[in-house]
Amino acid sequence: DTGVSQNPRHKITKRGQNVTFRCDPISEHNRLYWYRQTLGQGPEFLTYFQNEAQLEKSRLLSDRFSAERPKGSFSTLEIQRTEQGDSAMYLCASSLPVGQGTYEQYFGPGTRLTVT
Amino acid sequence: QKEVEQDPGPLSVPEGAIVSLNCTYSNSAFQYFMWYRQYSRKGPELLMYTYSSGNKEDGRFTAQVDKSSKYISLFIRDSQPSDSATYLCAPLRSTDKLIFGTGTRLQVFP
């Protein structure tokens, strides 16, 4: 399977714990995006990378959230001191470099986080 | 006001019906307009996208954009039970982030 992969698929954690999610993009895609989706809503943008550079962060991304893409390949999203309001589906997407004539973002299956 | 508005549904239609799904948006700078399909507890799957105004057809699906009225449509012909899913419109802001509507839940019954 050469699509976007995310791990773990499900995570249940207790309030106050730290969690980390991983995303592996499609191999030739240099752009990687994180979105968050709550029940009954569309995904909301969190942040994106071009190669290893983090180019934009949403105001939704509080200080407890940090994302990295150290070698321009996979990315991690960490949430520190989780709160019940962090319960959501965390989605990763990737796309080709800008200028290659397409702006399609392909999504992974998501990581569903439940904070108890 | 949200940048993208979409009726959440649910929209329930019989198999074989023509389905019309719609969004409105407020930012006139949007140039690319994506449609995603999302099955329950799965990631969104890109169906098709259009650039600027006009129509684009792909099999049973037709996407339409009217930039003068800031209106986006997706038509599904000969709808099938397997089309039952949530459909998300998503204009692309500049060349980076997608701005999603809430999604319309579609149910196609046999």
Image: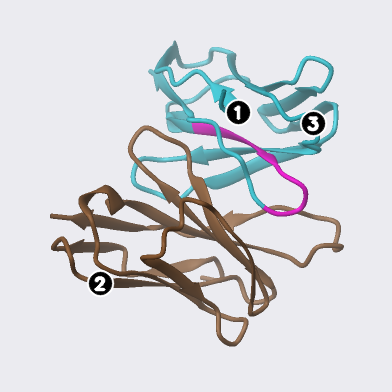
The residue tagged 3 is: B56
The residue tagged 1 is: B4
Relative to residue A81, is residue B99 depicted above or below? Answer: above
Amino acid at circle 3: Lys
The reply to whether the C-beta atoms of the residues labelled 1 and 2 are less than 8 Å apart is: no
Residue drawn at the location 63% of the way across and 80% of the way down: A52
Quarter holding residue B26? top right
Relative to residue B7, is residue B86 depicted above or below? Answer: below
Amino acid at circle 1: Val
Q: Which chain wears cyan?
A: B
Chain letter behind tag 3: B
Q: Alpha-carbon distance for marks 1 and 3?
A: 20 Å
| Residue B89 point in image, percent of width and height | 60, 33
Label 2 or label 3, whichever lies nearer to me, is 2
Q: Is residue A66 left or right of residue B45?
A: left
Q: Is residue A2 visible?
A: yes
